[in-house]
Amino acid sequence: MIYFGIALIIFLIDQGVKYLVATRMELYEQIPVIGNFFLITSHRNRGAAFGILEGQRWLFIVITIVVVIGIIWYLRKTVKAGQKLLPVALSLVLGGAVGNFLDRAISGEVVDFARFNFGSYTFPIFNVADSAIVIGVALIILDTLLESRRNKGNGSDSIEGKS
């Protein structure tokens, strides 16, 4: 199935870049890519997004296992239903979730490296898996909005159409 291939590609890119950062850079070392706006920064995160719930490794592992099983089940369901956008979105989330899961399971921390500065504000450092998850969730929201619009256009979701 092509959608598991998409998840695998995300996973492999994520793990490859994290490996390069972890083995070729010192912790907290920075490489400017676009001046002070975008820097490759070797960083480790023991928490979830933005470092929340730091040190809750087993909680993340259990939650991720449940989420991954749910995504795989729902992905298969959406493919059988002939949907196109939602399976791609779920594939991105799956690849990202498994990428960060492997880091947490093996070392208890996730390798982050993409740092963006907006003037004096520094956006939290992230990685390829995080990006895939965010893009996937955005596509899920988009798919939901488009589906809602299609249903309203068909009258199946309108107040008049409900009994």
Image (tube, rainbow, N blue to C red):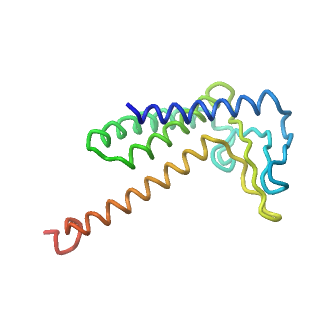
Q: Is residue 32 left or right of residue 112?
A: right
Does residue 105 sit above or below 161 in this rendering? above
Q: Residue furthest bottom?
A: 160
Residue at 85% across / 55% down in the picture?
A: 35
The residue that appears at 73% across and 56% down in the rendered structure is 123
Q: Quadrant of residue 54?
A: top right
Is 159 located above or below residue 100 in the figure? below
Residue 77 coordinates in the image, percent (x, y): 30, 39
- Quarter of the rendering containing residue 28: top right
Image quadrant in which the N terminus is located: top left
Question: Which residue is at the front of the view, 103 or 156?
Answer: 156
Q: Residue 82: percent from the left, percent from the top?
A: 28, 44
What residue do we see at 32% from left, 59% from top?
147
> Residue drawn at (68%, 36%), measured in percent from left and top?
110
In this rendering, the count of numbered labels is 0
Q: Quadrant of residue 99?
A: top right
Q: Is residue 38 left or right of residue 79?
A: right
As displayed, is residue 151 above or below residue 103?
A: below
Vertical placement of residue 84 versus 109, above or below = below
Give how far across and how far down residue 44 sits, in percent.
Answer: 75, 38
- Front residue (pair 85, 56): 85
- Residue sitting at the far top: 106
Quadrant the C terminus occupies = bottom left
